Image (cartoon, grey):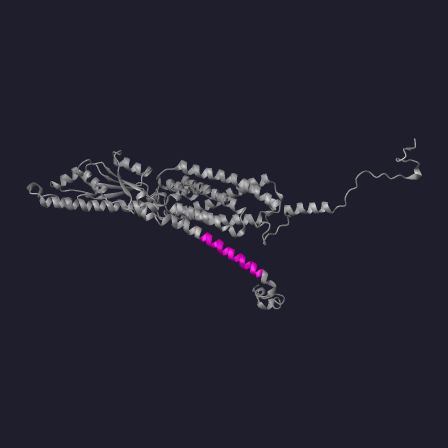
Amino acid sequence: MLGIFSWRRLHGKDDHRVSITAASIRGEVRSRAWDYLQLAAISTVMIWAGLSLFFGGVYRRSVLANNINVYIVDLDGGAVGTNVTRMVLDTAVTPSTPVWLQNHDLNSVDAVKAWVQHSGWGALVVNPGASARLESALAGADHYNASAAMTLIESTGRQVVAEMLYVSSALTTTAQAVARQYAQIQVTNFQATDDPAQQQPNYAALIHPVGFVTVDVAPAGFTMSPVMSTFGYLAILLSIIGVLIMWKMTSFPFFARVRFCDLALMWPVLLLGLALVLSFYQALAFLAFRGPNFNSQALTYTTATFFKFWFTGTAVAFSLGLWLFNWFLHLTPQLMALPSICTVIPNVLSTVSTFELAPKFYRIMYAMPFYNGSSLILYILTGAHPTIGRNVGVLVAEIVAMTALLTLSIWIRQICVLRGISDAHGWFHGSRYYHSHIPYYKDVRADAEHQAESLPPRRAGVEIVDYDDDGVSLTTGNLGV
């Protein structure tokens, strides 16, 4: 079989061909070179569009971290609570760290946990009775647990990357600084006292008066959590793009012969079926590779979780497929990658960053299907930051709007095909690559006008022909009666 590629089988086949430098094809080479320069310019625009969209959304996040608020909650009400609160609020504010605020409305550790899970980024809680326990230890009590003084509450399920990079580190760093500062102050005060009753304290409590434990109320620390939805939806989107391009290139006979109402129904149904299949594969992949530590660090995976995961992916894939197909139906081949890049990059960015860490322009990420789908998935898997109504509403609104827009796009595309304005590949009349067996409508009109002008002129009036041999004449009035 490989013999068909043998050079000897091609012997003599090149005899009628010319060199690329031959004068006979110089004009064709020149036109192709101009086309390739245009492609280079288009590629330059596309790569800078993609790079600018992505890096513009992440390069300033280290100086926008103070858009995130974390809270100190004093449930102790004593000396420890007052001193720790003062130390925390006196922490220097820098652009690269979250801002500390005090919350006076919460009255229990469970209430703080519920608040952080629902809407907060994180909180440092001075636990009830911290002052009484420390005073007892300094008075000579044997047992003292410094870690019971403070509780750090975080919620990685809200946004994994931001929580890990900024919130968790801010909580831990601040708590450690407070513990060191409190210990230094307490040792200094102890050395300065002359009260003999204070000379036999619990030295562990003296040197390490306050510590902390960390509680993640919506853990998303299982193996794939930072990249799970991002790369899952990205794989679906890239798979859809190839199918959409194939549909665009092979749909010319449909637009030429099939009714508009049938086409307007067919494409959304096909896209929905494709979205269901690809998102089903994504749900299966997560089921198989979610990681050995998933059940201990996320909500229990159930049958309902699988279907929620599947149908959320379907909504994301369907909305993106409708959006891109609207573009593909009308763009010429050299421009088809541009909407893909401008769709992929912002959607990926919406899952690896958060609005608080990006310039205001990137509030458009609220409308990104990746963002809304990822938010739903994180809530399904961790229970954090429920915004179900907004996320589902955005996805449904996008599907409805894109379906209506696709209906209009199909109508326009069919008119362009039937009038010879564009060909099967999307080239428009006037392009050197345009080729359609359907004549251009203006050419048809011009041909019709030319044919009408070439016909002989009609005579004015009526010509009467008499035959003398029948004795009847219209000209003389003899009708033979």
Q: Residue furthest top?
A: 481
Mark count: 0
81 displayed left or right of 421: left
Q: Relative to 130, say whether 237 is above or below.
A: below
- The percent coordinates of residue 318 (x first, y second) are 48, 42
Which quadrant of the figure has residue 355?
A: top left
Which quadrant of the figure has residue 205?
A: top left
- The percent coordinates of residue 46 (x first, y second) are 46, 52
Answer yes or no: is residue 136 visible. Answer: yes
Which quadrant of the figure has residue 73?
A: top left
Quadrant of the drawing holding the N terminus: bottom right
236 displayed left or right of 426: left
**At x 25% / y 47%, what residue is drawn?**
173
Quadrant of the drawing holding the C terminus: top right
Q: Main secondary structure of the magenta part?
A: helix
Q: Residue furthest front?
A: 460
| Closer-to-camera residue (142/190) | 190
| Closer-to-camera residue (406/144) | 406
- The percent coordinates of residue 216 (x first, y second) are 30, 42
Answer yes or no: is residue 293 visible. Answer: no
- The percent coordinates of residue 105 (x first, y second) are 26, 33
Q: Is residue 48 magenta?
A: no
Q: Which residues are magenta?
A: 28-47
456 displayed left or right of 368: right
**At x 28% / y 35%, what residue is drawn?**
111
**At x 28% / y 42%, what residue is drawn?**
99
